[in-house]
Amino acid sequence: MLNFYPGPSKVYPEVRTYLTDAYDEGIIGAPHRGEQFVQVSRAVVNSLKRKINIPQDYHILFASSATECWEILIQSLTRHKSYHIYNGSFGEKWCEQAKKLRPNSEGMKFDMNEHMPVDDLQISSDTELICFTQNETSNGTQVSATTILNLQNKYRDTLIAVDATSSMAGLNLKFIKADIWFASVQKCFGLPSGLAVLICSPRAIFRAKQLNERSHYNSLVPMYEKMLNYQTTHTPNVLDIYLMKRMLEDRPFIKQLDIDLTDRANDLYEFFSQFTEFKLLVENEEVRSKTVLTLQGSERLVDDIKKRALLYNIRLGNGYGPWLRNTFRIANFPAIGNDEYEELKRFFLHYYA
């Protein structure tokens, strides 16, 4: 099965070997307070900083998912409210979750064919956390590094948190431009679901210590304190952390992965622009995602495309949110090989050209 679903998506083929090695090395049953796990955790932290260019003074924590990170950050970094900027379903859901915890939280929706309107933002001085999604998986858009820098320059005194679930470990993100970044691993990391990486700047940790919120099992300060010894507050996904260690050891540095994914994204966008029965959902090339392509057509055609693809062992992603029935999505993740995309192209040329 060729898997182009945008998460959970295809895992690296080497994971099969890593799993066997994990069993043979006893890591699957290793205690999470033991030295074997600590060594693996330390190696993962060091490799993440080295391979995907995380600043050395940023802190790396583990959670179960990106959606859990939404909650952790609101609980531990705000007393009053956060501000959410979004153009799609996942950014909006983060805003909705924040309002359940902090009813005064605010949000602003912008058009998916526009850049994030930083100049138009009017965020009040009592806002404690600015939140947005760097790569909106629901519609296939992304926020550029330049836009993030402009946001940082405008609101220097406010913490900025970024959901980078569909781009971290695939694109060369400029982590220094925000205080918090997080992602689940079932996308560009090419690993099984059930683990998230949460990255915090020294400023974010300082703020968390000031608030000292400890009311939840995964409150940010206890998570940080445990990771000083490369441990977690909870029993973590030990296997996934081990798989990440092995994956990072074998993968190229992020600069090369970014070049490869960008080139392939450009090729795929050019390829799909030739079709007339369906079209690219995002019209503005400047805000299109490099890692998730979204194609739009009639509900009947989209349903036919997905069903016909499955007959040829090709899994395409469903639409999401408002675009559930009239779009399908294609992941452009590092674990998926170029030859698989060539087969995908042959399928579309045969049936829909």
Image (cartoon, rainbow, N blue to C red):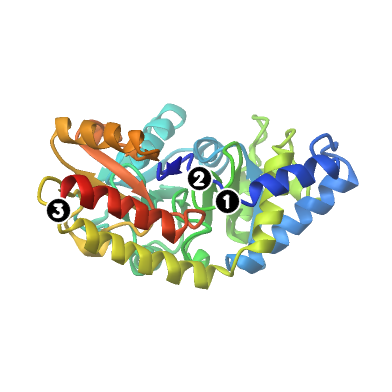
- Whether residue 119 is visible: no
Label 1–label 2 contact, CB within 8 A: yes
Foreground pick, 290 / 270: 270
Foreground pick, 232 / 188: 188
Q: Which residue occupies 54% across, 40% down?
A: 69
Specify the amino acid type for callout 3.
Answer: Phe
Q: Secondary structure at mark 1?
A: loop
Q: Residues within 10 Å of mark 2 (few under 14, many from 20)?
A: many
Q: Which residue occupies 61% across, 63% down?
A: 251
Q: Secondary structure at mark 3?
A: loop
Determine which of the numbered discs, if any, sits on residue 10 in the image: 2
Residue 223 quadrant: top right
Label 1 to label 2, Cα distance in Å?
A: 7 Å
Residue 332 quadrant: bottom left
- Whether residue 324 is visible: yes
Q: Which residue is mark 1?
A: 12
Specify the amino acid type for callout 2.
Answer: Lys
Spot occupied by residue 331 in the image (x, y as percentages of width and height): 39, 49
N-term mark: 3 or 1: 1
Q: Which residue occupies 71% across, 55% down?
A: 246
